[in-house]
Amino acid sequence: MSASEKINVLVVDDDAIRHEQFVANNPKCNIVSAYTVDEAVLHFDSGHFSYISLDHDLGEDSDVIPFVKHMAQAFMGGKTIPRMVVVHSMNPVGAENAVSHIRRLVPCYLSSGAWGASDFFAGIRFY
């Protein structure tokens, strides 16, 4: 990868402020934002990502598990899975649920566990 090429990162989170933080903390990355499972599926299916970062909770009545299952089905169909998937949820139980599903279904490196607000805003960097 040349210095001018940016790393593609898919961020799945329902909070716009978190997307802004990813962009601010990762100037060498092309951050693609998805706020819902449907958006995440659309971006994932149409692009290639080196990293994916997932929030467990996506609004009041949704979570990221359907997207994790979609990633697993896509892999079984021949799609390349990113080098790393990060769960950045502030919901410890939800984060462990997502991590459990990813470990079982998706062959990738995984940064596991829940991250609190102070950890998150300290900055996740992908380069």
Image (spheres, rainbow, N blue to C red):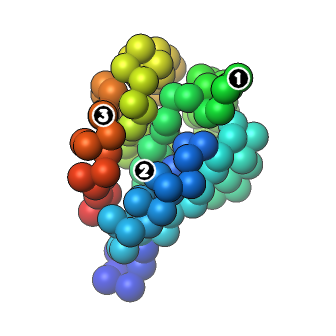
Res 51 label: 2
Secondary structure under the numbered disc 2 in the rendered image: strand
Q: Which residue is mark 3?
A: 116
Residue 64 visible somewhere in the drawing: no
Contact between marks 3 and 2 (CB within 8 A): the answer is: no
Quadrant position of residue 111: top left
Quadrant position of residue 123: bottom left
> Which amino acid, by three-letter code, is at mark 1?
Asp
Name the front one of labels 3 and 2: 3
Contact between marks 3 and 1 (CB within 8 A): the answer is: no
109 left or right of 23?
A: left
Mark 1 to mark 2: distance in Å?
26 Å
126 left or right of 5?
A: left
Mark 3 to mark 2: distance in Å?
20 Å
Secondary structure under the numbered disc 1 in the rendered image: loop
Q: Which residue is mark 1?
A: 61
Residue 116, given in percent of the width and then of the height, sits at 30, 34
Residue appearing at x 50%, y 55% in the figure: 17
28 left or right of 102?
A: left
Mark 3 to mark 1: distance in Å?
21 Å
Residue appearing at x 42%, y 32% in the figure: 89
> Which amino acid, by three-letter code, is at mark 2?
Tyr
Secondary structure under the numbered disc 3 in the rendered image: loop
Name the front one of labels 1 and 2: 1
Locate the N terminus by quadrant: bottom left
Nearest the viewer among 40 and 123 is: 123
Q: Earlier in the sequence, mark 3 or mark 1?
A: 1
Quadrant position of residue 53: top left
> Which amino acid, by three-letter code, is at mark 3?
Gly
